[in-house]
Amino acid sequence: MRDMVVSNYFIPKGSHVILGREEPGRNPKVWEEPLKFKPERHLMDDNSEVFLTETDLRFITFTAGKRGCPGVVLGTTLSVILLARLIHGFTWTAPPHRQVELVQSETGPFMARPLVVVAKPRLPNEVYGILD
């Protein structure tokens, strides 16, 4: 370990540095229009798979390095499976006389207003193990 200067900040040897998890994802020096929802920005140039454990630290959601989240693969996989099952299992519509608004909050990674939709099962109850 040694003293270091990062972005004109002096960091003495032995210091503990805590990074905000959200800030790298909102940095306009890294991302063009960082507050706009643009999922395509995370695709690699050759459309290959994106790795959450990449060394460029563009995806710091699960932290990084040898002390990174051990459940990153499990958590990501389960989230994708859950979303896929919800999309596949239901027909999704907006409530009568309402529109779906997908607007992100200015203060965090959440929606500005709650998402209100109607989910109707696509298949008969027997398929889901529900008996009448």
Image (cartoon, rainbow, N blue to C red):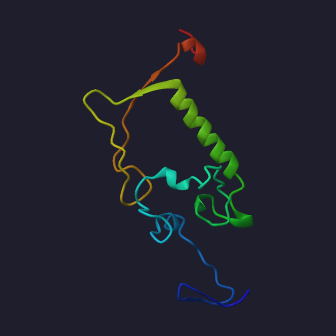
Residue 34 image position (x, y, % from top left): 44, 62
User: Which residue is located at x 54 percent, y 27 percent?
Assistant: 88
21 up-or-down from 79: above or below: below
Between 45 and 87, the one lying in front of the other is 45
- 65 on left or right of 17: right
- 13 on left or right of 87: right
82 up-or-down from 10: above or below: above
Residue 87 image position (x, y, % from top left): 51, 31
Identity of the residue furthest to the front in this view: 46
User: Which residue is located at x 33 percent, y 38 percent?
Assistant: 100
Residue 111 image position (x, y, % from top left): 39, 49
Q: Quarter of the image containing the N terminus?
A: bottom right
Quarter assignment of residue 18: bottom right
User: Which residue is located at x 55 percent, y 54 percent?
Assistant: 42
- 10 on left or right of 98: right
Between 101 and 46, the one lying in front of the other is 46
